[in-house]
Image (spheres, rainbow, N blue to C red):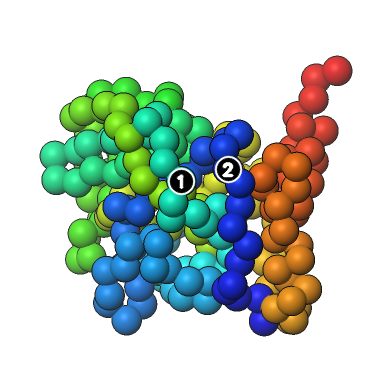
Amino acid sequence: MGNDPVPNYDINRRRNCLTSNDWVITKDGERKYLQHLKAGEEVQEVKPDGTLGYTKVYCFSHKDPHQSSPNYLEIITGTRSITISNNHHLVFTDDESNSSRTYKMAKEVKIGDRLVCHDGQHRNIEQITNIKEVEGKGAFAPITKSGELLVNGIQVSCYSSADPNLVHAALTLFRLAYDVTPTSMFNTLLWPNENGNPYIFGATVKLYNLLTSTE
């Protein structure tokens, strides 16, 4: 089945990632920084019904512990924070139910926006209290079966720039292939194209642009 090792990607052109300081909680209860996370591990997420669940990481679209950038955003609430690239989507809500969840890119958020969070026991809705541009080390973009995961206790999408719902739908067959494809073949699909992104994700972006074109 597809799993690590995954090629290192040249992400100089696009930084749609999380950093080495960001972490997840795995199914065995371990807090694991993204640079140590591997494909095949299950990590916490907030499920559509608002409960805590686990979703499998099946690949990375970026995985480079050495890359750094001065243009990450640190998004801060009353109890937690996350360092994330401008175009990466986070999960928001307008009320205490889970029915009004929406996505926003980090560069679109503002003070007072309400993030979907989880403390390991209860789902929490936390308002953003501060946003600042910071330098970040490392560039990591784990892709999960559900398309979302909890990072630093904050629910985020796995996807950047394009509509997460459309990208997730476009990758359905790719997720299914993970369970049955030999590792060598699966990793070939992950090899970077001329833009530094895996071929399969580059194809997905092209499909998205075609579907959303107004011409």
- Residue type at numbered disc 2: Ile
Q: What element carries label 1?
A: strand
Q: Count the labels in the image.
A: 2
Residue 21, compared with residue 172, is above or below; it is: above
Q: Is mark 2 on a helix, strand or loop?
A: loop
Residue found 48% across the figure and 71% down from its top: 38
- Residue type at numbered disc 1: Gln
How far from the left and from the top, in percent, is residue 19? 38, 49
How far from the left and from the top, in percent, is residue 84? 39, 40
Residue placed farthest to the left in the image? 78
Residue found 80% across the figure and 20% down from its top: 214
Residue of label 1? 67
- Which dot marks residue 103? none
Residue placed farthest to the top in the image? 215
Is 125 on the left-hand or right-hand side of 43? left
Residue of label 2? 11
Residue found 39% across the figure and 60% down from its top: 34
Residue found 67% across the figure and 81% down from its top: 1
Is 20 on the left-hand or right-hand side of 195? left
Residue 204, compared with residue 215, is above or below; it is: below
* Residue contact at pointers 1 and 2, CB within 8 angstroms: yes
How far from the left and from the top, in percent, is residue 208? 74, 38
Is 159 on the left-hand or right-hand side of 198? left
